[in-house]
Amino acid sequence: MSDQLSDQVAVVTGGASGIGRAIARIFAENGADVVVADVRDTPREGGTPTHELIEDETDNRAAFVECDVSDTDDLEATVATADEFGGVTVWVNNAGIFRTEEFFDVTPEEYDQLLNVNVKGAFFGAQYAAEAMVERCGGSIINVSSVAGILGNGGYVSYCTSKGALRLLTYALAHRLGPDGVRVNAIHPGGVETAMLGDAHLDDQARDAFVQAIPSRRMGEPNDIADAALFLASDRSSYVNGESLLVDGGYTNTG
Ligand SMILES: NC(=O)c1ccc[n+]([C@@H]2O[C@H](COP(=O)([O-])OP(=O)(O)OC[C@H]3O[C@@H](n4cnc5c(N)ncnc54)[C@H](O)[C@@H]3O)[C@@H](O)[C@H]2O)c1
């Protein structure tokens, strides 16, 4: 691969599985040391833990931190682990949960559970990361939102609320942190083949209709999102800030 992330230390929340796993791997393949921060170390889809795979397959260092992103003590421990590698320079707020729901049945506890992971986790993840980055004169924060952060869907209102919040968190933080040399951008994936897509419980007909509404006529793969994250993490995007990048095969802006 390349060395475009050499000397970088990346934290990927939710990096054990799916999209986060692909991001962690591509970052390491391109020279970064990587901290995987997740509530589990084995991928939801099965296989070797991400940090072990990186240590086996690349010359770069990798570590796993058991981290619930909604717990600020865990976020602090994650920053401390990145410090052992030299200090975080790239932080990806990727951890997230999805559920379909009947809006009228959502309880305050269910609302808190989803928003605490998807929004509070990213807000304080960014706060801890930025504190370390400002000390070291810069970095890149990437928030993994969703097309559901742009298009509303009545079948998962809490999730849309959380992903829309990430979009504006991105813009507000770009404004706040840009002068300190920290860039903040968002990625909005469309449907991506991970265990989470299974959480949507699409039947064959619904899945087919979804694919037909995507101009590229396929679901995304985790590496489609990882390639975009690599761009936003690297100097290739040094003048990209406060951007919200759709990676959805054209789904959102057409039809
Ligand atoms: N798969 C899709 O179609 C899709 C589409 C748009 C956006 N996204 C977003 O991409 C991100 C990754 O999704 P994915 O498809 O890889 O999901 P996934 O369920 O396959 O993996 C998510 C990972 O996050 C971890 N996680 C969950 N709660 C956590 C917490 N509290 N603290 C730390 N880690 C936690 C899980 O253990 C898991 O390893 C999510 O933010 C998701 O909302 C996914």
Image (cartoon, helix red, strand yellow):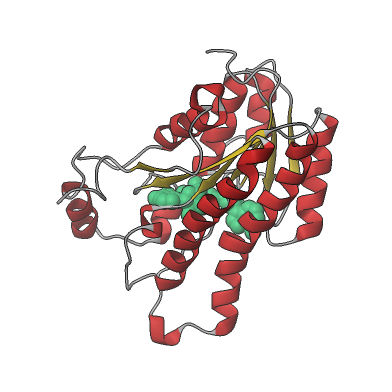
Measured as percent of width and height from the top left, residue 77 is found at 82, 48
User: Relative to residue 29, is residue 133 depicted above or below?
Assistant: below
Determine if residue 39 is in view: no
On the picture, is 233 further left or further right than 249?
right
- Residue sitting farthest toward the front: 179
Measured as percent of width and height from the top left, residue 111 is found at 54, 76
User: Relative to residue 36, is residue 159 depicted above or below?
Assistant: below
- Residue sitting farthest toward the top: 2
Measured as percent of width and height from the top left, residue 210 is found at 22, 53
How many numbered tags mark residues here?
0
- Name the quadrant containing residue 21: top right
Residue sitting nearer the eye, 38 or 249: 249
Residue at x 71% of width, y 52% of height: 127
Residue sitting nearer the eye, 149 or 58: 149
On the picture, is 47 further left or further right than 208?
right
User: Relative to residue 160, is residue 242 depicted above or below?
Assistant: above
On the picture, is 214 further left or further right than 123?
left
- Name the quadrant containing residue 193: top left
Residue sitting nearer the eye, 178 or 170: 178
Determine if residue 231 is in view: yes
Measured as percent of width and height from the top left, residue 55 is found at 70, 23
User: Relative to residue 228, is residue 246 depicted above or below?
Assistant: below
